[in-house]
Every structure is written in structure tokens, then in C-alpha cells.
């Protein structure tokens, strides 16, 4: 099984989105955070994402939510780093991270 690491950027993304949701509904914010975390952890067993828009990355949609987890695999395939958690309404070009 791979080790899953969350980058600082991905944790910041997750926090920003949960804080935004919590302004209106704290319970929903907790559910969204749990679903995103669970999806990320599940990638350790089975990295099911497709090649990402940024070279060397993969993207995994979060089931029933408008989020994409962007991740990279280590060269020896023993670790997976979650790089970003992006809302699907964000418009970003290939080879360019959202700002």
C-alpha cells in the first residue's frame, strides 16, 4: 500500500473550501471535508485518477462533489502526494496551477 501525503497547498485548499461552506452550513462542511479526505486516503490502495492537466500529475474526481484531487506518484510508486484540491468551477489552463 502506498503512503499518502498531503502537501501544504492541498491542506490550504481543503481548509479554504471547508471554511467557505461552513459559513452557511457547518454540518455540510464536515461532510465535504470527510468525503475529500476519504477519497484521498483511498488513493493509497487504488490510484484511479486519470492523467492530469499538469504534466506528471493525475486527477481524481470526488464522487458526488464538485472537487478534483490532483496528485503525483513517487518514482518507485510507494508514495502518493496530494498536491491540490480544486473546485471544478475553477478555470485553469494546462501546465498552470490555479491561483
Image (tube, grey):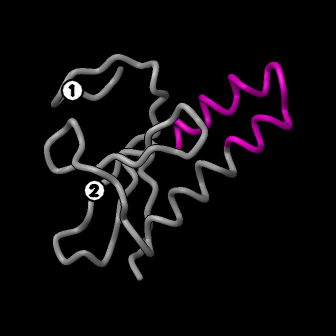
Q: Is residue 17 above or below residue 72?
A: above
- Residue 19 location, x and y as percent? 70, 28
Secondary structure under badge 2?
Answer: strand
**46 relative to 33 in the view: left or right:** left
> Does the segment drawn in magenta span residue 71?
no
**Quadrant location of the C terminus in the rendered image:** top left
Tell me the residue at 52%/45% (across/down): 62
Could you classify mark 1 by the number of other residues whose Cα lies within 10 Å: few (under 14), some (14-19), or many (20 or more)? few
- Residue 15 in the image: state x and y as whole percent: 61, 36
Expressed as whole percent of the image width and height from the top left, the position of residue 59 reads 34, 46
Q: Judge whether 9 appears above or below 50 on screen.
A: above
Mark 1 — residue? 96
Q: Main secondary structure of the magenta part?
A: helix
Instruction: Look at the numbered discs 2 and 1 and tell me whether their residues touch, using CB distance below 8 Å.
Output: no
Q: Secondary structure at mark 1?
A: loop
86 on left or right of 71: right
Which is more N-terminal, label 1 or label 2?
A: 2
Q: Position of residue 47 (x, y in %)?
A: 36, 65
Instruction: Quadrant for residue 90, please give it.
Output: top left
Look at 34% across and 16% down and name the residue there.
91
Q: CA distance from mark 2 to mark 1?
A: 15 Å
Q: How many marks are shown on the rendered structure?
A: 2
The magenta-colored residue range is: 11-32
Left/right of residue 90 with respect to residue 72 in the rendered view: right
Residue at the spot of label 2: 72
Residue 65 has which mark? none
The furthest residue to the front: 64
Q: Residue at x 52, y 37 (%)?
A: 12
Question: Per the image, is 12 magenta?
Answer: yes
Q: Quadrant of the N terminus?
A: bottom left
Amino acid at each position: 500500500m502506498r503512503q499518502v501525503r498531503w502537501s501544504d497547498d492541498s491542506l490550504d485548499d481543503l481548509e479554504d473550501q471547508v471554511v467557505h461552506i461552513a459559513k452557511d452550513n457547518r454540518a455540510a462542511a464536515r461532510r465535504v471535508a470527510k468525503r475529500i479526505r476519504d477519497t484521498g486516503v483511498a488513493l493509497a490502495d487504488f490510484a484511479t485518477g486519470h492523467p492530469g492537466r499538469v504534466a506528471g500529475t493525475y486527477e481524481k474526481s470526488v464522487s458526488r462533489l464538485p472537487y478534483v484531487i490532483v496528485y503525483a506518484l513517487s518514482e518507485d510508486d510507494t508514495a502518493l502526494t496530494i498536491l491540490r484540491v480544486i473546485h471544478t468551477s475553477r478555470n485553469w489552463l494546462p501546465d498552470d496551477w490555479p491561483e
